[in-house]
Amino acid sequence: MKIIQKISLQTISSRRICLRRISLLAFSVLLIACEKPAEPPPPPRPALVTVVGAASENAGMVLVGEVKSRYETNLGFRINGKITARKVDVGAVVKKGQVIARLDAADTNLSAAAALADVRAAEASYALALAEVERQRILFSKKFISQSALDIREAELKTSAAHLQQVKAQAAVSGNQSRYTALVADRDGVVTQIHAEPGQVVAAGEMIAQIVDSRQIEVLVAVPESRMRDLQVGNNVAIKLWADKEKTYAGKVREIAPVASSATRAFDVRVTVSNADDAIKPGMTAGVIFTQITADGVVIPLSALTQINGKNSVWVIENLFDNVGIANPRAVVTGPYTENGVMLTSGLQAGEMIAIAGVHTLIKGQKVRPVFAAQEKVETEILLKKP
């Protein structure tokens, strides 16, 4: 009986162990069934990038200006009058002293004749006063007249002499007025403007014609204040005409305005054309290529620069493989800012790839897929192939 009871207890214990094992197995299966499948890693995010190149030692600045003559003279009569003749037309080549136009000289000739008559009368009065003084001196030497009588005659002589000088000066002015009826060129050049015609009554100083010296040609450009630091008188430049972009002229900075223009807030700079020919004419549009020395470094777009922990940084795309790279931040030292971006003096080398958009959303070590701008794609491929 005891043996039977012992066997029953062992059987019950074995069943309990089996039930426990079955329960644990079922629970494990349930846990495995409830677990979520592992998510695949996110694909590399696109990033707009560029490959930086070494900044040129001579960073060029191209500005558009107007061709002008160094000497542009606006001619006008020095007296009022009515124009009776115009001797030249627009485009005429004139020489110094050549007559441009004439005024009616009738009134000025009459004034000159009247002034000349006054001179003749004054000369006669002076001759009479001189003869009278001579006679008085003889009488005084013989004690026939007093000293006061002689002094009166000598004073009259001085008055007559002064009057003679006065009328001679007035006659010279009248003679000049007669000569002023002819408007003459003050230098060799080309007539570019005419503002009066025969029969027109003009005032003194009113512009009649403009003459420019075609032998001394220069280009006037407005330089922004951000580029004035390195600009100096005597700097060499290159000049190209819009009318003929194949030919390049040599030039030199001749003059820099000391103050900025109130209208443009830029500084007027005049560039002398060293080898000007007949093809370059006043009024044409010209491009002036300034050459300015800058520090060594690389230039990056402003959008590529960011602040990380208070330091200027860029995101460098490294370990590029199968068009996928790793984005890592790098501190850089910035230099001058230019129209093309900001120059980096250290921290980045030419040929390295950097992100230029969305730099504030990148994470260190993040995988990215570089995307190049269309206009940079060909140049970038060339850079990447270089050893």
Image (spheres, rainbow, N blue to C red):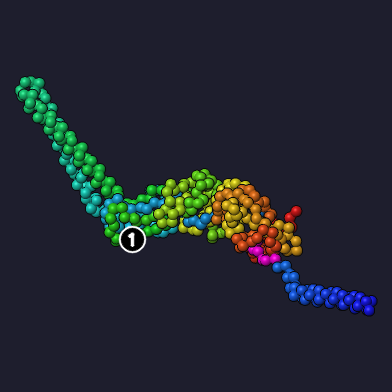
Q: Is residue 92 above or below residue 17?
A: above
Camera-nearest residue between 169 and 316: 316
Name the residue at 17% across, 34% down. Answer: 161
For residue 115, side relative to residue 374 (left or right) = left
Name the residue at 36% across, 50% down. Answer: 184
Q: Secondary structure at mark 1?
A: loop
Whether the magenta-drawn stretch holds residue 45 is answered as yes
Whether the magenta-drawn stretch holds residue 116 is answered as no
What x and y, as percent, mark residue 59?
Answer: 59, 51
**Residue 241 shows in this picture:** yes
Quarter-of-image position of residue 361? bottom right
What x and y, as percent, mark residue 249?
Answer: 56, 52
Q: Residue reaching furthest top?
A: 142
**Residue 215 shows in this picture:** no
What x and y, as percent, mark residue 362?
Answer: 64, 61
Q: Residues within 10 Å of mark 1 (few under 14, many from 20)?
A: some
What x and y, as percent, mark residue 158?
Answer: 15, 32
Q: Residue reaching furthest front?
A: 1
Camera-nearest residue between 102 and 382: 382
- Give the magenta range: 44-50
Q: Is residue 78 above or below residue 17?
A: above
Camera-nearest residue between 343 and 91: 343
Q: Is residue 113 above or below residue 199?
A: above
Name the residue at 47% across, 50% down. Answer: 269
Quarter-of-image position of residue 48? bottom right
- What predominant SS class does the magenta segment belong to? strand
Camera-nearest residue between 387 and 332: 332
Quarter-of-image position of residue 320? bottom right
Q: If the image is split into quadrants, where does the N terminus sit?
A: bottom right
Task: Identify which amino acid the numbered label 1 is placed on.
Answer: Glu
Residue assigned mark 1: 197
Name the residue at 46% across, 46% down. Answer: 255
